[in-house]
Image: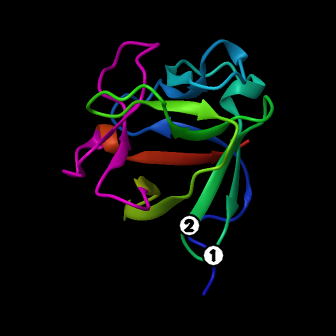
Amino acid sequence: MAPIIPDGDYWIRNAAFEDLYVDLSGNSTAPNTPICGWELHKGANQKWHVTTTNGVNQYVIKSAAGDAFISQSDIRIYPPQIAGQPVPLQWSIEPVGENLFRIAFVYANGVITLPSNRKGTQLNLEEWIGERNQKWLFESA
C-alpha cells in the first residue's frame, strides 16, 4: 500500500482559514516554540519535511528551519498546544475529503486544529468533529 502522502517538503495550509499556514514561530528551533497559523512567506519555518514511519499513514513532521518537529508543548493546559520539539512525535495523516487531510495524534483522540483566523494563533489538539479548521492541505514546497 502506498503512503497517504508521499515523503517530501510541504507548505501545510488550513482548509478553513485559507491564507494561514503552519508556521514555527519566530523561526526558532528552541523546545516549546509555538506552532501557529501565519500568512505564507515561504520561509524555512513554514516548510515541513513529511516522512512516513510505517509506509502508509504514520508520519513525523520536521521543520526545514532545523531540529524542530511538530509535537505537543510541555505546557500542560487543555486543549494541549502544538509546539516545536527536538524529539519526533508520530502523527497519522488521514484523508477527509478531496485533497484534505486531518493530522491526528496517534496515541489519543485528537487532531491538530487552528482555533482562530487570527494570524499568530497557536495550533492545538482538539477532539475530531470534522470542522474545516481541523482539515489541512499539503502543498508541495
Q: Quadrant of the C terminus?
A: top right
Q: Secondary structure at mark 1?
A: loop
Q: Mark 1: which amino acid?
A: Asn
Q: Which residue bears the numbered disc 2?
A: 58
Kindly tell me whether residue 97 is visible in this rendering. Answer: no
**Near-viewer residue (68 or 76):** 76
Which x, y percent locates residue 22?
A: 54, 31
Kindly tell me whether residue 28 is visible in this rendering. Answer: yes
Q: Indicate whether 123 appears above or below 87.
A: above
Residue at 64% across, 54% down = 60
**Circles 2, 1 touching at the beta carbon (< 8 Å):** yes
Q: Mark 2: which amino acid?
A: Gln
Residue at 48% across, 62% down = 92
Residue at 39% across, 40% down = 15
Q: Indicate whether 127 appears above or below 118.
A: below
For residue 2: magenta? no
Q: Secondary structure at mark 2?
A: strand
Crowding at dot 1, Cα within 10 Å, few <14 / some 14-19 / many 20+, comes out as: few
Q: Indicate whether 55 appears above or below 80.
A: below
How far apart, in angstroms, are the residues tagged by discs 2 and 1?
6 Å
Q: Which residue bears the numbered disc 1?
A: 54
For residue 123: magenta? yes
**Near-viewer residue (66 or 17):** 66
Specify the segment rendered in magenta: 105-132
**Near-viewer residue (14 or 90):** 90
Residue 8 as seen in the image, left or right of residue 78:
right
